[in-house]
Image (cartoon, grey):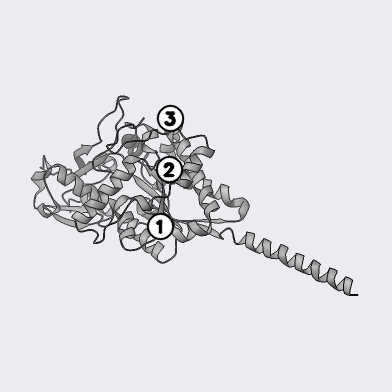
């Protein structure tokens, strides 16, 4: 009898351990993965273009990767851009975020705990656009006039950098805050005198024109390089999520780096342009903005010297312009191990060219 009881208790204990093991395994994955995107399409449409993030979303790549685990992928596209993503993260609504430099830095300076895991690109052209009837020939001609920018977003630093290049500051103008699409409407109606935005749709309607175009210096291949106005974009992961689900983070990064490779292949250029029109912007918009660039440059995910230097520069600018009150250190903010592993596992360690602090090829 004692032997039977012992056998029964042993079996029960083993079953309990097995069940406990299954429970522990089940807890090793989240019910959902939530990604905050600091942008939205025309009219707030939950689709964007012009980035690897768009390619991953529109091609359903995260959904495909995690379907076998029963993990739901939740995409949040915020017309309120970077500040809205920060708010969502502070309220525990997102696990990963896609950010431009200023809101990324503002969030970190106010205590948001996340880790930078890879870049989604090195930046593209910048256009300063004025109403079609504007008589201005230079930025200085607009002194005292009304310019708009989306305050709290990377666009605010874009404008500050552009003005500095021409020896000007925000104090020389009346600066108001507008999102991308409100600013385009205001340019069309001449309610503002200038804005940094994509000009093509406005010019095709005859309601606005470019005052300035800044692309960056051309390299030996005849393609444009880094731009003194625009900066790299970033994907980060919340520290708590990263500590709890490191294997999930690795798979997430692998999906994006594989997509960055697909996006960097010249054979996929036209496919991307067409894919991105789902955002509501036109094929011509993307073709004009991207044709002068090497795709491997624009989609470069590396946290190289250039990425680090530009992020540190953005921190210094944010402090100088009074956009943050607390300094942000960059080196301890980076978590490159997931990117390094993805590059190794996918055989892409030498695919993208790292850039030095000045944006020149480092090899």
User: In terms of secondary structure, where does tag 2 sit?
Assistant: helix
Specify the quadrant that holds the N terminus. bottom right
Label 3: how many Cα within 10 Å (few below 14, some 14–19, many 20+): few
Residue at the (44%, 65%) spot, across then down:
92
Of mark 1 and mark 3, the one earlier in the sequence is: 1
**Nearer to the camera, 276 or 319:** 319
User: In terms of secondary structure, where does tag 1 sit?
Assistant: strand
Of mark 3 and mark 2, the one earlier in the sequence is: 2
User: In terms of secondary structure, where does tag 3 sit?
Assistant: helix
- Horizontal arrangement in the rendering, residue 274 relative to residue 218 (left or right): right
Q: Dot 3 corresponds to which residue?
A: 266
In the image, residue 313 sits, relative to residue 34, either above or below, namely above
- Horizontal arrangement in the rendering, residue 362 relative to residue 5 (left or right): left
Marks 1/2: CA–CA distance: 20 Å
Label 2: how many Cα within 10 Å (few below 14, some 14–19, many 20+): many
Marks 3/2: CA–CA distance: 14 Å
Q: Dot 2 corresponds to which residue?
A: 52
Residue closest to the far right: 1
Residue at the (20%, 53%) spot, across then down:
148
Indicate which label's residue lies in the foreground, 1 or 2.
1
Q: Dot 1 corresponds to which residue?
A: 114
């Amino acid at each position: 009898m004692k032997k039977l009881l012992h056998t029964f208790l042993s079996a029960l204990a083993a079953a309990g351990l097995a069940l406990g093991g299954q429970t522990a395994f089940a807890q090793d994955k989240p019910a959902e993965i939530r990604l905050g995107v600091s942008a939205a399409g025309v009219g707030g449409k939950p689709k964007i273009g012009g980035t690897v993030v768009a390619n991953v979303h529109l091609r359903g790549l995260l959904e495909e990767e995690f379907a076998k685990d029963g993990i739901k992928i939740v995409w949040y596209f915020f017309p309120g851009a970077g500040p809205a993503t920060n708010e969502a993260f502070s309220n525990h609504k997102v696990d990963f975020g896609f950010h431009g430099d200023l809101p990324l830095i503002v969030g970190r300076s106010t205590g948001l705990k996340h880790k930078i895991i890879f870049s989604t690109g090195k930046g593209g052209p910048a256009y300063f656009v004025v109403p079609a009837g504007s008589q201005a020939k230079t930025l200085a001609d607009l002194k005292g006039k009304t310019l708009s920018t989306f305050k709290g977003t990377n666009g605010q630093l874009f404008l500050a950098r552009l003005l500095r290049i021409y020896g000007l500051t925000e104090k020389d103008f009346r600066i108001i805050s507008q999102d991308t699409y409100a600013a385009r409407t205001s340019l069309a109606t001449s309610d503002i005198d200038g804005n940094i935005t994509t000009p093509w749709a406005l010019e095709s309607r005859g309601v606005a024109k470019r005052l300035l175009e800044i692309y960056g210096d051309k390299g030996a291949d005849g393609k444009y390089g880094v731009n003194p106005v625009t900066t790299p974009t970033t994907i980060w992961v919340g520290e708590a999520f990263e500590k709890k689900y490191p294997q999930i983070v690795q798979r997430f990064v692998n999906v994006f780096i594989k997509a960055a490779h697909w996006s960097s292949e010249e054979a996929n250029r036209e496919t991307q342009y067409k894919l991105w029109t789902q955002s509501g912007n036109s094929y011509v918009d993307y073709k004009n903005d991207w044709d002068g660039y090497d795709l491997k440059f624009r989609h470069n995910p590396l946290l190289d010297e250039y990425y680090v230097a530009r992020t540190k520069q953005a921190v210094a600018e944010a402090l100088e312009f009074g956009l943050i009150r607390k300094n942000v250190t960059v080196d301890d903010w980076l978590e490159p191990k997931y990117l390094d592993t993805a590059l190794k596992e996918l055989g892409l360690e030498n695919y993208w060219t790292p850039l030095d602090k000045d944006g020149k090829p480092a090899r």
